[in-house]
Image (spheres, grey):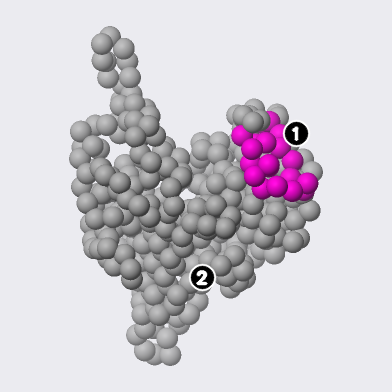
Amino acid sequence: MGHGAAYDLVHNSPDVETVTVVDFDLGKAEQVAASVGTSRIEARQLDAANYEAVVSFMRGHDSVISCVNYWYNESLSRAAIETGANFCDLGGNNYVVDEQLALDAEAKAAGINIIPDCGLAPGMVSILAMHGANRFDTLDEIHIRVGGLPQNPQPPLDYQLVFSVEGLINEYIETARVIRNGEILEVNSMTELESLSFENFPLLEAFQTSGGTSTLPDTFLGKVRELDYKTIRYAGHCEKFKTMIDLGLCSSDEIVADYIKVKPRKVFGELLQKHLPADGPDYVLVRLEFVGKRNGETKLFRYDIVDKQDEQTGLSAMMRTTAFPASIIAQMMARGDVLERGATPQEKAIDPAKFVMELEKRNIRISIS
């Protein structure tokens, strides 16, 4: 995802002057810089856990994008406040996001933006939700469905790793926040299985997962009766993965095996990385459905996005739809092209019409019906 963000900043963003890509492993940062291929990008070594080093690095940058694991994002947000750099990240955990949003007063005082959860879902779909909501006089329902799928699915899970395995497991085991009958509720992930179809795809399934609604339930509380998010997969995936969860393979409780203490989740994560394919050609499917009233009539609008790996650049659909939105938001923050400063949910800070225009420039197109 860092590669995708760097590519967009350099090749799709004429206002960007310089880009610094950093990683704990300097070789990886240098590989990204070389792949992007321009004199305007510099590679440096940085440990995201070293607060003093992070503060030193952030100084002099207008915006910073975090593509590291979610548990670093609260301290990175504090470093951004200290240095006066705008900050956004790819999110991945509701509790961390709450900690970041609690920094609102400090971010306002620093004159910066901190905007968490700026990837795909959570991320782009939150701004699209606001874009769709603006089409109605009164809104009743928002239903969001998103999935990253391999173009060539392989058994047993018909899935490939396209982002952090820790983030994937979190999505599948933590509770999902929804609005039901006008109230915020938490429901178990891997439940409420449904079938859905996209043109030229086999029958797909969608099920509850954590994190996808991000701050939307709080933003739309009192404004809609129903709001939910489900993850799209090839049919059969949910039942297979839920069986492994039910067997305890995603548990963080230590067990003893041959006199050695191990956490099943760590072992399972390693096995997923070892046995699941990665980096194959992919699709990203997005669907948002809205129900409400417009000019006194009940209307239903559907937003569909079908993106696939860019054969010319080699960027995957997941890189395009996750990293490009973060890059767009980072640039909007740097230009001051936001609706308000502070630590703010993106659906409140980002102009949805301008955001959609930027997506279209990158050939991420929304079919509205």
| Residue 279, disc | none
Q: Is residue 259 above or below residue 212?
A: above
Q: Regarding mark 2 in the picture, which secondary structure is present there?
A: loop
Horizontally, residue 219 falls left or right of residue 169, namely: right
For the residues marked 1 and 2, what is the alpha-carbon distance in whole angstroms? 39 Å
Q: Is residue 28 above or below residue 281?
A: above
**Which disc is residue 365 wearing?**
2
Residue at (64, 31) in percent of width and height: 27
- Residue, x 28% and y 51% (percent of image)? 187
Crowdedness of circle 1 by 10 Å Cα count: few (<14), some, many (20+)? few
Nearer to us in this view, 197 or 152: 152
Between 13 and 275, the residue placed more toward the observer is: 275
Quadrant the C terminus occupies: bottom left
Give the percent coordinates (x, y) of residue 235: 24, 55
Q: Which mark is residue 56?
A: 1
Q: How many marks?
A: 2
The outermost residue toward the front is 312
5 relative to 167 in the view: left or right: right
Residue 79 % position (x, y): 67, 38
Closer to us: 349 or 275: 275
Q: Is residue 42 magenta?
A: yes
What's the residue at 52%, 57% (across, down)? 311
Q: Where is residue 60 shown, x and y percent of the image? A: 79, 43
Residues 45 and 221: in front is 45
**What's drawn in magenta, residue-wise?**
28-46
Q: Is residue 128 above or below residue 151?
A: below
First of labels 1, 2 by sequence position = 1
